[in-house]
Amino acid sequence: EVQLVESGGGSVKPGGSLRLSCVASGFIFSNAWMSWVRQAPGKGLEWVGRIKSKTDGGATDYAAPVKGRFTISRDDSNNTLYLQMNSLKTEDTAIYYCTTNNYYSMDVWGQGTTVTVSS
Amino acid sequence: QTVVTQEPSFSVSPGGTVTLTCGLSSGSVSTTYYPSWYQQTPGQAPRTLIYNTNTRSSGVPDRFSGSILGNKAALTITGAQANDESDYYCILYMGSGISVFGGGTKLTVL
């Protein structure tokens, strides 16, 4: 069974940093494209970014609101996806979901981890 | 900046059929946008229903189908059930590595 378990969420002050992790199991992680999606309280889903598999070049892409502040990376030896978030803003407050990809769509979703940015 | 549009809300009677759409503020949706659809109930993670326009995700009943209708992507639910009452989101691949979600449709079954 494919499973994704996010961790690393918490409370942080504006301007601070946080690193989220997503441990994957049940599939060949190194072959997978992966994405992060977030959802602010009471709002809709927002695509954050994507990382391709190393065999497909390992490129990353980001949504405009997070580009230059967030970095997606992967550790294929430990089946783990990361989201490094710097210069956090109050509007980054959200549940952050890790997902597998199928083409340019999301496939399997984790349960999410909550990030709160507040002074 | 192009916006992905969805109906804010929709209602359907139990047993009925409903079609939700996913469009662009400028231009037409085609298969090259790789439209996909997600269902989310309150307090739960989203669930993938349809990817690559019309391919059902594993375990999704065939009451759910995806297509291109006119200049929009569409999600059709036939034989609506009470537990279909959820928020539905589409996402489009805009090119250059960027994907954008629509604002979501709140579906009521009554």
Image (tube, rainbow, N blue to C red):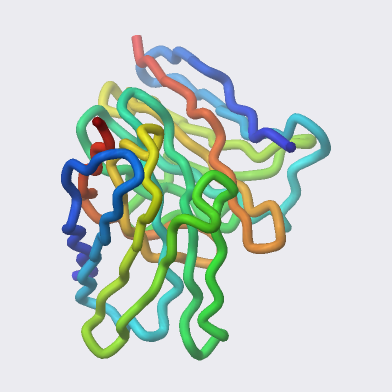
User: Going by the image, does B69 lie left or right of A116?
Assistant: right
Q: Residue at x 49, y 58 (%)?
A: A49
How far across and down, in percent of the image, does residue B5 sit?
Answer: 64, 29
Residue extending farthest top: B110
Q: Which residue is drawn at 47% across and 55% down?
A: A69
How far across and down, in percent of the image, does residue A68 sit?
Answer: 53, 58
How far across and down, in percent of the image, does residue A14 sit?
Answer: 32, 39
**Foreground of the two, B72 or A13:** A13
The N terminus of chain A sits in image quarter: bottom left
Based on the displayed image, in which of its 4 quarters is residue B63 positioned? top left
**Foreground of the two, A22 or B35:** A22
Against A118, is A79 above or below? Answer: below
How far across and down, in percent of the image, does residue B110 sit?
Answer: 34, 9
How many numbered discs? 0
**Foreground of the two, A85 or A38:** A85
Based on the displayed image, in which of its 4 quarters is residue B87 positioned? top left
User: Going by the image, does B106 lie left or right of A62?
Assistant: left
Q: Residue at x 47, y 36 (%)?
A: B89
The C terminus of chain A sits in image quarter: top left
Against A48, is A33 above or below? Answer: below
User: Going by the image, does A69 lie left or right of A86?
Assistant: right
User: Going by the image, does B76 lie left or right of A27?
Assistant: right
Q: Which residue is drawn at 20% across and 32% down?
A: B43
**Foreground of the two, A3 or A93:** A93
